[in-house]
Image: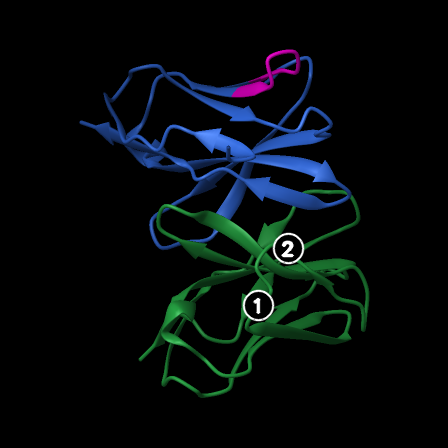
Chain colours: A green, B blue
C-alpha cells in the first residue's frame, strides 16, 4: 500500500512566521506535488517535483517555495505566512505518468 | 471558463437510488481521466480511471465522451457510505492533474 505522510494534521501560525510543511512517501515515486484546497476553489497546484533537487512552479506558487533534497521527501515552505495562506495543504506522490496518491493533509491556520 | 467543471451539488438521494454526475473539460488534448472520492476532512482517493471504452467497477460506471469533452460517473444502488465529494480529474500533460471543484453526494436512509 502506498503511504504518503505529512508532518502535521493541524498547525496554527502567526502572520510573518516561516512555516515548514513536510511530506514523505515510502514508494520510491519520482513525482511529488503540493496542493492547497479551499472551499469553492478545489485543489490548486502550488509546486511539483519530478526528481531530487528539481522543482517546477504550479498554478499558484507565489508566497511559497519548496525543497526536495531526497527522493522520498518534499517540503513546502511559507517564507512569511499570511492570513490568505490559511488553507488545507495536500501533498501527493506518483510514479511516472500514473495516478497520484495523497497524504492526509495539513490544516494550516494563520492568525 | 474553468478547465474542469462540475456541478457542486449537493445531490441528495435515497438509499438504493441511481445517481449520475457529469464533468466537462475544456482541453481537447487531455490525455487521461479519473474520478477521485474525497470524504469530509480527508484526502482525495482514486475511485477509478476512465477509459475511452467506458469501465465498470461494481456499482460504479465511468464513461468518457471525447467528442463532447465530458466524463460521467454512474452509481447504482447507492449506499449511505457513498456519501462524499466526487472529484473529476483530467491529466493534460505528463503527470499534471487538473481537478474539478467536486460534486457533493449525500445518500439518505
* Magenta region: B63-71
x, y (%) of residue A24?
63, 70
Q: Is residue B68 part of the magenta span, yes or no? A: yes
**Chain of the residue displaying label 1:** A
The answer to whether marks 1 and 2 sit on the same chain is yes
Q: Is residue B108 left or right of residue B102?
A: left
Crowding at mark 2 (Cα within 10 Å: few <14, some 14-19, many 20+): some
Mark 1 vs mark 2: which is more N-terminal?
2
Give the x, y percent position of residue B85.
Answer: 38, 38
Q: Quadrant of the C terminus of chain B?
A: top left
Callout 2: chain? A
Tag shown at residue A2: 2
Q: Which mark's residue is nearer the viewer, 1 or 2?
A: 1
**Farthest-out residue, left:** B109
Label 1: state its secondary structure.
loop
Q: Are marks 1 and 2 in contact (CB under 8 Å)?
A: no
Q: For this view, does A4 lie left or right of residue B1?
A: right
User: Which element is circle 2 on?
Assistant: loop
Seen at 49% across and 47% down, the residue is B44
The alpha-carbon separation of the residues under discs 1 and 2 comes to 30 Å
Question: Does the magenta portion include A13?
Answer: no
**Which quadrant of the view contains residue A51?**
bottom right
Q: Is residue B58 visible?
A: no
Whole-percent x, y for residue B93 in the image: 75, 40
Label of residue B51 in the image: none
The image shows residue A28 at horizontal and vertical percentages of: 77, 62
Q: Is residue B101 above or below residue A30?
A: above
Between residue B53 and residue A68, name the one nearer to us: A68
Residue at x 49%, y 83% (from the top left corner)? A80
Question: Which residue is under mark 1?
Answer: A62
Amino acid at each position: 500500500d502506498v503511504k504518503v505522510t505529512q508532518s502535521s494534521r493541524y498547525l496554527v501560525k502567526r502572520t510573518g512566521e516561516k512555516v515548514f510543511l513536510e511530506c514523505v512517501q515510502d514508494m520510491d515515486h519520482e513525482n511529488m506535488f503540493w496542493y492547497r484546497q479551499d472551499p469553492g476553489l478545489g485543489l490548486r497546484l502550488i509546486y511539483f517535483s519530478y526528481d531530487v533537487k528539481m522543482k517546477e512552479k504550479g498554478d499558484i506558487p507565489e508566497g511559497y517555495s519548496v525543497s526536495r533534497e531526497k527522493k522520498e521527501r518534499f517540503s513546502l515552505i511559507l517564507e512569511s505566512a499570511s492570513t490568505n495562506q490559511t488553507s488545507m495543504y495536500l501533498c501527493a506522490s506518483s510514479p511516472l505518468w500514473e495516478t497520484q496518491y495523497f497524504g492526509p493533509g495539513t490544516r494550516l491556520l494563520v492568525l | 471558463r474553468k478547465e474542469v467543471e462540475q456541478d457542486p451539488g449537493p445531490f441528495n438521494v435515497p438509499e438504493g437510488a441511481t445517481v449520475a454526475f457529469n464533468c466537462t473539460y475544456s482541453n481537447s488534448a487531455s490525455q487521461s481521466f479519473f474520478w477521485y472520492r474525497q470524504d469530509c476532512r480527508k484526502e482525495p482517493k482514486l475511485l477509478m480511471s476512465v477509459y475511452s471504452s467506458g469501465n465498470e467497477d461494481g456499482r460504479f460506471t465511468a464513461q468518457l465522451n471525447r467528442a463532447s469533452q465530458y466524463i460521467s460517473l454512474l452509481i447504482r444502488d447507492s449506499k449511505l457510505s457513498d456519501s462524499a465529494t466526487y472529484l473529476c480529474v483530467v491529466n493534460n500533460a505528463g503527470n499534471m492533474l487538473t481537478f474539478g471543484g467536486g460534486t457533493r453526494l449525500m445518500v439518505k436512509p
